[in-house]
Amino acid sequence: MPQDDYQSPRTLARFILRETLFGSLGTEGERGYPFVSVVGLAAMPDGAPAILLSNQARHTLNVRKDPRVSLLLLEKPHAEDPLTVARLTVSGAAEPIDKELMRQRYLMRHPEAIKYAEQPDYVFWRVNIDRGHLIGAFGRTSDLAVEDLIGGPAKP
């Protein structure tokens, strides 16, 4: 989505939430240190991010202890200079969701995940967004409420 002076932060943030395929997941790790890993994403019907995690992964063990997470998402992850593209950080609590609820949606975005999505070790998690922070361009930042990020159509 091209950025311009007329694009609202809400519209850009919702676009990033719905279109980004991968993001950086931050969880609370050992001794309280942040632990960050890369995860695949698919948007739920309301726009909230869903992730598929292995029960054996360290980030999953962390989320089971403390469900508070952050996700960092880039508008164009393959940009030559990622610091020049829009970035969205969302924070909230992760909760496991029914596999059938997300399976088809997730596999449409990540067909390669068929190899492990059916394994009993893998669980879908919804990130219940509490807030977001958008860096739309140099000097253009916005703090966003959950209502700005998910739900009905974005309002300018």
Image (tube, grey):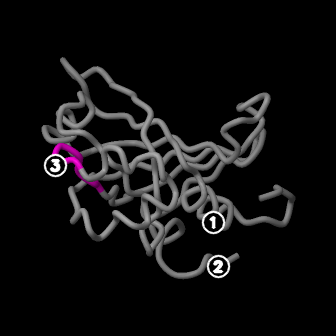
- Figure disc tally: 3
Residue type at tag 3? Pro
Residue in the image at 82% along x and 55% along y: 3
Residue 10: assigned label: 1
Indicate the amino acid at tag 2.
Answer: Lys
Q: Looking at numbered disc 1 in the image, what kind of residue is underneath it?
A: Arg
Look at the numbered discs 1 and 2 and tell me whether their residues touch, using CB distance below 8 Å.
Answer: yes
Q: Which residue is mark 2?
A: 155
Q: What is the x, y in percent for residue 156?
A: 70, 76
- Quadrant of the image occupied by residue 128: bottom left
- Percent of width and height locating residue 118: 26, 53
Mark 2 surroundings: few (<14), some (14-19) or many (≥20) residues within 10 A: few
What is the span of residues highlighted in magenta in the rendered image?
119-125
Give the residue drawn at x 62%, y 53%: 142
Q: How would you rate the neighbour count of disc 3 (Cα within 10 Å): few for under 14, some for 14-19, many for 20 or more?
A: few
Looking at the image, tell me whether mark 3 or mark 2 is earlier in sequence order. Answer: 3
Mark 2 or mark 1, which is nearer the start of the sequence? 1
User: Which mark, residue 120?
Assistant: 3
On the image, the x and y values in percent for residue 36 come to: 39, 28
Q: Which residue does the image show at 24% across and 39% down from the upper left?
A: 54
> Is label 3 in a helix, a strand or a loop?
loop
Q: Is residue 144 above or below residue 71?
A: below
